[in-house]
């Protein structure tokens, strides 16, 4: 028991938000008379919060790099959504070509903001606040204050489409491909965990007790397969979820297994020490903001697809949702600490809060108040746990 408590204390950041997410889901499941976890609502939860999940991944790297934030992501999403709408709706451009050009433009935006932050050393708060005003203004100018719609069906498929069932009709009312995907994900998870445990033993690192290890695997397998069942009972796996899953895997790998990822953590922990160790801190900060702009483009494309329009009002408060998701997910305000997975859990906490309170019919005033309190308590928990 003492060993288990010690492990929990050492990994309190990781476990606390998972436990909080489970409690919040259980609470709203009871309060909404079971509506929260209806298959259709679970699917909608992913679709409605896809943009926060994507932005939170990029924002995590900004925060890890030294407590930096990007206040311009909402305006950049709206601006790039407006460009996408202009290319596809007004200019009748091919969808693939339009998306490629929008990604290129996002890289130029990242270079613009990254230059001022990384090489001129203007605080990220100031540069991105300016960016928020600049790109919001450009969005309104480009759209002349009007909403541009509709997009072609092929473009709407990005946010409204589902992976087709390869075994349609095998089990009535169940998307069997989704069930198989859940089983495949479970097998991959078990193999990865066994390999990770074996490697730790090989290098004489401490491993969790066998009983706790098996319990952890069972809980994760239950979560994966319950989630795949919920999706299968509606329309299956949303296309956008495949995109988000790929982004999570790629960016988790970059953060934990690559040299640039380790350099960003080192820079966030102590920038001077990292610089003396040979880390090119300016270059890493520059690349971090280019990456954030590219992910803003992806989020903007997905949101325009879901909205089926390019609107001057798109993207308002996106930056606040993304920043809150990172801090709720355990990122440290001073930098150097945070994970992609934690940010995703934080974004899900925000998403469940939004969805649950909307089902209960709470007004936006109460929703903002409660989300603000959750954010404050999360950061307070981070500060207090670091003191201990």
Image: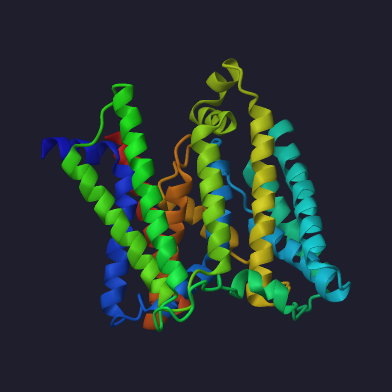
Q: Give the quarter of the image for residue 220.
A: bottom left
**Against 207, is 135 above or below?**
below
Locate residue 162 relative to residue 77 in the image: left or right.
left
Q: Is residue 272 visible?
A: yes
**Residue 150, percent across and down?**
75, 81
Locate residue 255 relative to residue 26 in the image: left or right.
right
**For the point 76% across and 42% down, which residue is it?**
111
User: In the rendered view, how is the structure colored?
Assistant: rainbow
Name the image quarter holding the C terminus: top left
**For the point 35% across and 54% down, which residue is it?**
377
Which residue is at the far right?
91
**Against 12, is 206 above or below?**
above
Locate residue 33 relative to residue 173 in the image: left or right.
left
| Image label count | 0
Q: Give the quarter of the image for residue 38.
A: bottom left
**Residue 177, percent across and down?**
46, 69
**For the point 69% across and 51% down, which residue is it?**
294
**Residue 86, percent across and down?**
83, 70
Which residue is at the far left?
1
Q: Can residue 121 be seen in this view?
A: no
**Against 354, is 58 above or below?**
above
Name the image quarter holding the N terminus: top left
**Residue 264, percent across and down?**
56, 32
Closer to us: 377 or 261: 261
């Amino acid at each position: 028991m003492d060993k288990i408590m010690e492990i929990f204390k050492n990994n309190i950041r990781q476990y606390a938000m998972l436990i909080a997410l489970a409690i919040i889901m259980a609470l709203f499941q009871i309060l909404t008379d079971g509506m929260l976890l209806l298959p259709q609502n679970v699917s909608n939860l992913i679709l409605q919060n896809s943009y926060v999940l994507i932005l939170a991944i990029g924002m995590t790297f900004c925060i890890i790099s030294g407590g930096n934030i990007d206040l311009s992501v909402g305006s950049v999403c709206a601006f790039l959504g407006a460009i996408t709408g202009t290319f596809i709706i007004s200019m009748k451009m091919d969808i693939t070509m339009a998306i490629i050009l929008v990604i290129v433009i996002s890289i130029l935006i990242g270079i613009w903001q990254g230059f001022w932050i990384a090489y001129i050393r203007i605080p990220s708060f100031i540069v991105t606040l300016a960016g928020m005003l600049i790109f919001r203004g450009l969005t309104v100018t480009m759209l002349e204050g009007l909403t541009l719609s509709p997009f072609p069906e092929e473009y709407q498929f990005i946010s409204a489409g589902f992976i087709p069932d390869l075994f349609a009709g095998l089990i009535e009312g169940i998307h069997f491909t989704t069930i198989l995907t859940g089983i495949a994900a479970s097998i991959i998870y078990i193999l990865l965990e066994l390999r990770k445990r074996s490697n730790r033993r090989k290098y004489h690192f401490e491993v969790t007790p066998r009983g706790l290890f098996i319990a952890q695997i069972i809980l994760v397998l239950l979560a994966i397969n319950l989630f795949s069942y919920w999706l299968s009972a509606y329309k299956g796996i949303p296309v956008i979820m495949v995109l988000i899953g790929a982004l999570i895997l790629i960016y988790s790998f970059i953060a934990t297994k690559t040299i640039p990822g380790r350099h960003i953590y080192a820079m966030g922990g102590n920038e001077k020490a990292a610089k003396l160790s040979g880390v090119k801190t300016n270059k890493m900060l520059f690349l971090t903001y280019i990456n954030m702009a590219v992910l803003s483009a992806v989020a903007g494309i997905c949101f325009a697809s879901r909205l089926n329009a390019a609107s001057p009002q798109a993207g308002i408060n996106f930056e606040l949702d993304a920043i809150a998701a990172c801090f709720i997910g355990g990122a440290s305000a001073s930098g150097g600490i945070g994970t992609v997975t934690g940010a995703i859990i934080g974004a899900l906490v925000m998403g469940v809060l939004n969805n649950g309170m909307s089902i209960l019919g709470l007004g936006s005033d109460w929703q903002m108040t409660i989300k603000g309190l959750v954010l404050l308590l999360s950061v307070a928990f981070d500060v207090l746990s670091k003191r201990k």
